[in-house]
Amino acid sequence: MRKPVYVYKGEALASYGFGDEHPFGSDRHAAFHDELAAADLGAAIQYAEPRRASVDDLALFHTPQYIDHVSRMSQEGTGFLDQGDTPAFPGIFDVAADVVGTTLAAVDAVMAGDASRAFVPIAGLHHAARDRAAGFCVFNDCGIAIEYLRARYGIRRIAYVDIDAHHGDGIYYGFEDDPDLIFADVHEDGRYLYPGTGRADEVGTGRARGTKLNIPMPPGATDEDFAAQLPRIEEHLSALEPEFIIFQCGADSLEGDPITHLCYTEETHAITATRLCALADRFCDGRIVGTGGGGYNRSNLANAWTRVVRAFAAPD
Ligand SMILES: [Zn+2]
């Protein structure tokens, strides 16, 4: 019998948020889980518990100086971790480590064969760099997961696919010269949206040239515009043959998000998830982990992520 899709749920994950006045509020977790429960996917999904990452896990990607900085700011509990996007609060170190640990738990569940696929809603914190916080992101769970797959399982060729409205700069620049990190990112053109990076000519450096695919989209881009680009992602991954896929499916690329200007519907997330599952089946023994990423319109994130889980759970 096919194994279930693991979906991570728990207070430790919900706690990653910056208060009710902030777009990244703690209510995003419940908004998704209420919608997922209503979808009634039965035994096709199984809920799993968050886990906390160790300092050694964090150090797979982040510098010791940055980890110490977050630890100090977590004890002080005020101010900002970066230039003004990512506030510090008491205990933020542990809460951010819970997100990372949960993404690593999802990787472990898929690698062990306990789960067919896995999804972590509050995760995909793709702006954090190796040495600094950025854009609501403290620790880069996806970057750490990439290094963890290599260190723990000897899996080197990993595809990272990102359809969040914002460019996944923490992953792109963290692995810009790494030929084994296969990167594909469709995002709102950096001339109109934070973080301003991800030009089409950013294709990787040195031996990694050609392993990175950046596709900037104009403000107002629709499902049709996205669908026209999707074959490029499929060709990119097929040519480079990944062993594992990490999917950052930020829902801030849907129409009606308060801080971006793309106009997809949840169909884009459903179709991308389905196509990536097909690639995972072809190249990766089915192994794919989804992370929620951004998304600040609550009904959008609930719908988009539920469609991703539904696609992950679809029979072959
Ligand atoms: Zn985003």
Image: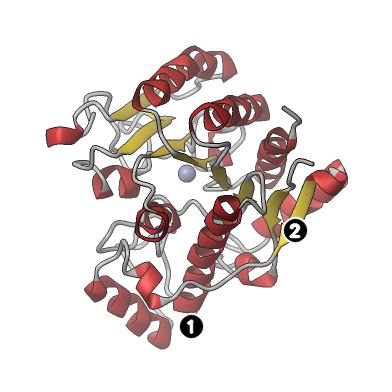
Question: Which residue is under mark 2?
Answer: 47
- Count of numbered circles in the view: 2
Q: Nearer the viewer, mark 1 or mark 2?
A: 2
Residue 23 appears anywhere in the view: no
Which x, y percent locates residue 60? 32, 64
213 or 85: nearer the eye?
213
Q: Nearer the viewer, residue 235 or 301?
A: 235
Labelled pair 1, 2 in contact (Cβ < 8 Å): no
Residue 82 picture quarter: bottom left
Callout 2 secondary element:
strand
Sequence-wise, the earlier of marks 1 and 2 is 2
Q: State whether residue 174 is above or below residue 199.
A: below
Residue occupied by mark 1: 90
Q: Quadrant of residue 70?
A: bottom left
Q: Residues within 10 Å of mark 1 (few under 14, many from 20)?
A: some
Residue 64 visible to an observer of this rendering = yes
Q: Position of residue 282 (x, y in %)?
A: 53, 26
Residue visible at 80% across and 52% down in the picture: 34
Q: Which mark is residue 210?
A: none
Q: Which residue is at 70% across, 41% downward?
A: 309
Q: Secondary structure at mark 1?
A: loop
CB of mark 1 near ligand 1 (< 8 Å) = no
Residue 71 in the image: x percent, y percent?
A: 36, 81
Q: Amino acid at mark 2?
A: Tyr
Amino acid type, mark 1: Pro
